[in-house]
């Protein structure tokens, strides 16, 4: 028998079914008597929801049910935030609030808006109908009365005390790192470089938009859904429905990519509500446009870096202020900004570090988890700063990195001692050696 | 004029959630005929965790990958695996699967000790057979499991793993937020057209320290996919948001890298083994993307001598920066 364990490039378990088209994605699932759902979403970024008139939509031929926030089972609450810190025992920190809010860290995103719209794309009402076309037509017949509010779209503006309040405090998270004495290091530095970097909002663009099917048999609620975390979905659905956690079954349908964008609740709670109220299977599949409007984005950052170094090219200090626009809801924002702060030095040992990293609410699309989770943004900054330093000192980009990389026994910005498996130096050397075999354009950097 | 340049980007990435408990678990059932059911909460979203976790169990039990059926991400069947995020599932669910397999193996090992009258330290399982001091015996694993079952001893295992971390101090950030870190260096060659500002990425050398590659082809797949995603982030992608409204909410106006944009990617797998990982493995899912934009920004500077301080590095920004440089 040939080795099929560690280190073997065996063919993937899912290869044949995907290549032959047998894999069932959520949109492929058909259940007997299945209804089709659509979501009414806000078209304004900040407003008080005054009234909803669903009568025409409910009377539209083929429509089986129209739901609003009032149809969410269980006691009511106001979704108020608990203090904006990450808590290790999330359920203890954020007891259930109703009408239900969802979110991995804070339960601040309403399943259906009951009082305030905070972004374009907020879910307001649901329709289940015999056909997708009937559901789509009925959604357009729901009359929404709202009073627009002043909105804020710039995170720096949003941090000011007189800014429009997206939530009671627009500053969602402040993550601080303090190591050594940066001011003393700047006072003694040979080279100081200070720059502002900006990064943009981007979309995950997984091939498969969000989709799911739900059914309720009177005791068990079962969902097939495109997701990155069935056990989180189970808790969110159970809390929304005021059901025991073990009465909700989440089965991951074959999932066509996620990249972090399918960590948030999308179709799950809406499907659960519709299946519960209709007692029929219900399917909800986002269009590409709905997916792009409603799903979380990569956080755009404003990054201010000030770095100090010796004339030999050794980094001695990093002072950074990082501001991330998390949009209307927290999603993974506190986690993203925490990870950005922890990783802000890059894979280098910097003895003096001062970082203030903010996640800030605005009325922009929600930002959340996306492959890299806040780190590609800071990598752009620390790698640019290092190249600027190398140029100033006449060092090669390779040499300046080799002078600064973490090695076994090295201490990170948070004081963690790295004991083993610290391969950054090896990746630099192997990448440089491999690059030099790729042709004359790759410089022959000297490895000291 | 077309000008070429080369740039380096490095990164590190903590595996798992930052300074938070984030366990995962697994069940293993080793059946009479030697086949294995592996049940994991971990969602395979296309990254290949079902495959990787089966390989880890295959290695631990000494059975073939083909004999393992994986059931993943069904809350009525599989124990909790946490999120498929934070590049954590190979390290965390991988450890859980290995521990579950080890528990099932323990029962079989005790039976082998009895059958062969050899101390456990001399026994190992590989290629479907029991090995004694590294030499293959006549005892097939499937016969061994059948023996256990005949005596009423079920070869079942469960395992869970939570990385060894501490929370971060709210004032200083002090703490050990990750059990391990992945590292990478990417070196990129670009060609910039100074007349149009267009950037073409010609070649990427991507060296990633993954601890140990469970499935090298799949590691290369992650590196290639991540690099292309990073290329899009660096040069093409941007949601245009005006007054909270996305102006390009579909793929006809939102620019993604396509097959025509994909450069030659030379992947280098570096294996600096992590003792707390399953057989030394860490993770690669997110690291694949992280250094690419940084490396491209540095390569553009090397090519044309202007530094762009905002992403994406569009032709408009390149031309504006070149104009500013020539004015000075």
Image (cartoon, rainbow, N blue to C red):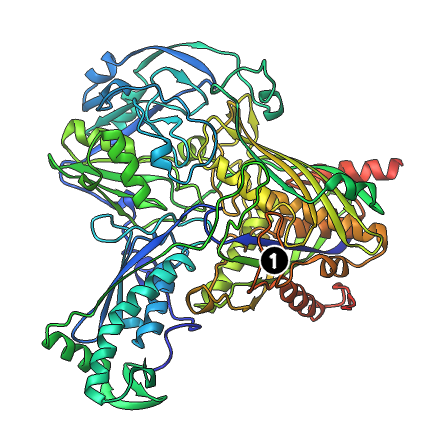
- The answer to which of A25 and A74 lies nearer the viewer is A74
The relative height of residue B120 versus residue B265 in the rendered view (above or below) is below
Q: Which residue is mark 1?
A: B263
- Would residue A441 be found to the left or right of residue A434 on screen? right
Instruction: Answer yes or no: is residue A411 visible.
Output: yes
Residue A276 percent across, percent down from the top left: 18, 30
Q: Residue furthest right?
A: B328
The relative height of residue A3 versus residue A134 in the rendered view (above or below) is below
- Would residue A363 be found to the left or right of residue A126 on screen? right
Instruction: Answer yes or no: is residue B235 visible.
Output: no
Residue B176 percent across, percent down from the top left: 53, 51
Residue A411 percent across, percent down from the top left: 63, 55
- Taking the spot 32% from the left edge, 71% from the top edge, the residue there is B65
Other residues around mark 1 within 10 Å, as few (<14) / some (14–19) / many (≥20): some
- Taking the spot 35% from the left edge, 89% from the top edge, the residue there is B133
- Would residue B298 be found to the left or right of residue A171 on screen? right
- Chain designation of label 1: B
- Taking the spot 44% from the left edge, 13% from the top edge, the residue there is A47
The relative height of residue B126 versus residue A248 in the rendered view (above or below) is below
- Give the quadrant of residue A132: top left
């Amino acid at each position: 028998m040939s080795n099929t364990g560690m280190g073997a490039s065996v063919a993937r378990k899912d290869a044949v079914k995907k290549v032959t088209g047998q894999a069932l994605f959520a949109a492929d699932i058909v259940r007997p008597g299945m209804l089709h759902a659509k979501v009414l979403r806000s078209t304004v970024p900040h407003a008080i929801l005054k009234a909803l008139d669903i009568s025409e939509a409910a009377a539209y031929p083929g429509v089986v049910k129209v739901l609003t926030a009032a149809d969410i089972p269980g006691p009511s609450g106001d979704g108020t935030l608990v203090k904006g810190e990450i808590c290790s025992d999330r359920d203890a920190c954020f007891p259930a609030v109703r009408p239900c809010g969802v979110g991995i860290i804070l339960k601040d995103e309403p399943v259906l808006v009951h009082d305030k719209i905070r972004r374009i794309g907020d879910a307001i009402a649901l329709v289940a109908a015999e056909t997708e076309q009937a559901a789509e037509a009925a959604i357009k017949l729901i009359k929404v009365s709202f009073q627009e509010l002043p909105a804020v779209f710039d995170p720096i503006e949003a941090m000011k005390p007189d800014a429009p309040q997206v939530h009671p405090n627009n500053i969602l998270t402040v993550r601080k790192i303090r190591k050594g004495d940066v001011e003393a290091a700047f006072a003694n530095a040979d080279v100081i470089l200070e720059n502002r970097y900006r990064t943009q909002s981007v979309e995950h663009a997984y091939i498969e938009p969000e989709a799911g099917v739900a059914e309720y048999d009177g005791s068990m609620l079962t969902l097939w859904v495109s997701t990155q975390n069935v056990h989180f979905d189970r808790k969110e659905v159970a809390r929304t429905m005021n059901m025991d956690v073990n009465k909700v079954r989440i089965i991951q349908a074959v999932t066509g990519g996620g990249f972090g964008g399918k960590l948030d609740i999308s179709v799950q709670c809406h499907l659960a509500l519709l299946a519960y109220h209709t007692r029929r299977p219900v399917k909800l599949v986002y269009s590409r446009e709905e997916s792009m409007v409603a799903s979380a984005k990569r956080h755009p950052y404003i990054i201010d870096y000030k770095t100090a170094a010796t004339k030999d090219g050794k980094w001695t200090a990093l002072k950074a202020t990082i501001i991330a626009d998390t949009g209307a809801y927290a999603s993974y924002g506190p986690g993203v900004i925490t990870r950005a702060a922890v990783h802000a030095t890059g894979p280098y040992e910097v003895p003096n570090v001062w970082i203030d990293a903010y996640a800030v609410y605005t009325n922009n699309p929600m930002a959340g988890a996306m492959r890299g989770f806040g780190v590609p943004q800071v990598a752009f900054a620390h790698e640019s700063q290092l190249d600027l330093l190398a140029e100033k000192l006449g060092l090669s980009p390779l040499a300046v990195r080799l002078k600064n990389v973490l090695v076994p026994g090295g201490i990170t910005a948070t004081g963690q001692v790295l004991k083993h498996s610290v391969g950054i130096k090896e990746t630099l050397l192997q990448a440089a050696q491999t690059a030099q075999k790729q042709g004359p354009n790759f410089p022959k950097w000297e490895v000291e | 004029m077309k000008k070429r340049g080369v740039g380096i980007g490095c990164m590190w990435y903590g595996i798992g959630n930052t300074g938070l408990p984030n366990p995962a678990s697994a069940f293993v059932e080793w059946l009479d005929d030697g086949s294995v059911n592996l049940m994991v909460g971990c969602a395979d979203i296309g990254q290949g965790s079902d495959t990787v976790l089966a390989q880890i169990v295959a290695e631990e039990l000494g059975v073939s990958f083909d004999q393992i059926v994986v059931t993943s991400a069904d809350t009525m069947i599989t124990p909790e695996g946490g999120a498929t995020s934070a590049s954590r599932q190979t390290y965390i669910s991988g450890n859980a699967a290995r521990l579950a397999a080890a528990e099932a193996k323990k029962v079989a090992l005790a039976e082998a000790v009895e059958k062969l009258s050899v101390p456990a330290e001399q026994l190992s399982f590989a290629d479907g057979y029991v090995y004694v001091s590294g030499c293959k015996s006549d005892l097939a694993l499937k016969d061994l499991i059948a023996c256990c079952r005949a005596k009423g001893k079920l070869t079942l295992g469960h395992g869970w793993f939570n990385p060894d971390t501490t929370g971060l101090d709210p004032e200083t950030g002090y703490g050990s937020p990750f059990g391990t870190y992945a590292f990478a260096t990417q070196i990129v060659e670009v060609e910039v057209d100074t007349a149009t500002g267009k950037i073409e990425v010609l070649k990427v050398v991507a060296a990633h320290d993954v601890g140990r590659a469970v499935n090298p082809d799949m590691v290369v797949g992650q590196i290639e996919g991540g690099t292309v995603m990073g290329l899009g982030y660096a040069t093409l992608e941007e949601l245009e948001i005006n007054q909270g409204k996305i102006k390009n909410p579909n793929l006809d106006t939102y620019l993604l890298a396509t097959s025509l944009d994909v450069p030659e990617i030379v992947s280098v797998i570096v294996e600096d083994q992590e003792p707390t990982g399953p057989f030394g493995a860490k993770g690669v899912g997110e690291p694949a993307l992280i250094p690419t934009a940084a490396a491209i920004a540095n390569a553009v500077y090397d090519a044309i001598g202007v530094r762009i301080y905002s992403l994406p590095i569009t032709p408009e920004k390149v031309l504006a920066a070149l104009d500013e440089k020539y004015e000075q």
